[in-house]
Amino acid sequence: MSNRIHIVFTDLDGTLLTSEKKLSRANLQCLEELQREKITRVIATGRSYYSFSTGLATKIPADYLIFSTGAGIMDLTSDQLLYSANLNRKDIYYITRHLQQNNIDFMVHHAVPENHYFTYSGLPEKNSDFSKRISIYNNFAKKFSSYDALPESGAQIIAILPENLDLFEYIQEGLSDYQITRTTSPFDHKSIWMEISPAHASKGHSAAWLCDYLDIAPSTTFGIGNDYNDISLLNFTRYSYLVANAPTDLQKRFPITNSNNDDGFYHAVRNALNSGM
């Protein structure tokens, strides 16, 4: 392997893992080989730290975790929180009022790293994707009662919209002071999740922060993803790939590798390293 690449960033669900949430033998061996070559391995996921650490059947060998789409960075060797970005109470008030005025279902997540706890507002019976997420995290979910009951700070607010890009863009216009990240639902694979975070919170920003922290040049970075919330990461990394199962409208923006079910991570890493990058 070449040492021209010093750090590898990979999305998790739909990229490193198969559609059955498993880590293939080839991808596991690739991660282990990166470790032997002293290439830093970073998981960059929309999952919370809690979901990553408790919700996977297999332990993922990696050095750092960018979680909640850039809201936090964890050193996985020491379980030390290195970086966090949270909305303050004023932000939370403004965003939630805007969403309620437009009849949008949403969840206000607590501050990092306890952001698997959330307060939700909406009608689960009319939004099956919204209902699914509440049922999965029922032990951490609390129904909205009043603005005074909202947390003092929060990692992000997730609004769940129907498959309606015009509505997404309309809501986004009223939240121009914040980082708005579009994600495809991991449940029904069609609903639009709008992740609302501080202006400086994204996978790309956190990747840049980590490279600076580790004194790694951006010119030696590799990234791979599968969805809209990976765009900022892939715009940051020097060598960037999409797996073949990425949305069609993204596939013209970055080189394409195999799908997540056909060891796309392994093939992209091998291609990048063996081509002398």
Image (tube, rainbow, N blue to C red):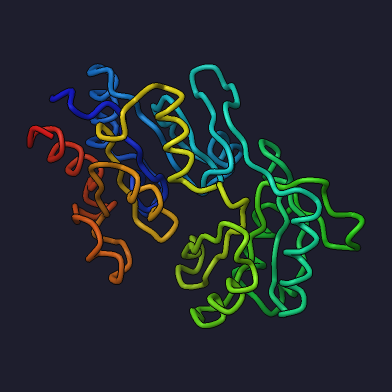
**Residue at (57, 65) in percent of width and height:** 194
Q: Which residue is nearer to you in this view: 141 or 269? A: 269
Write down the quadrant of residue 50 in the picture.
top right
Residue 2 on image: x %, y %: 13, 25
Residue nearer the viewer, 208 or 25: 208
- x, y (%) of residue 152? 83, 46
233 sits left or right of 110 in the view: left
In terms of image quadrants, where is residue 101? Answer: bottom right
Q: Nearer the viewer, residue 113 or 253?
A: 253
Residue 178 visible somewhere in the drawing: yes
Quick check: 225 above or below 222?
below
The answer to whether residue 198 is above or below residue 79 is: below
The C terminus, quarter of image: top left
- Considering every residue shown, the one lying at the far front of the view is 177
How many discs mark residues in the rendered view? 0
Q: Is residue 168 left or right of residue 274?
A: right
Residue 18 visible from this viewpoint: no
User: How far across and down, in percent of the image, does residue 212 sit?
Assistant: 43, 28
Vertical position of residue 127 compared to residue 209: above or below = below
In the image, what residue occupies the spot 31% across and 29% down?
A: 217
Between residue 84 and residue 90, name the one nearer to us: 90
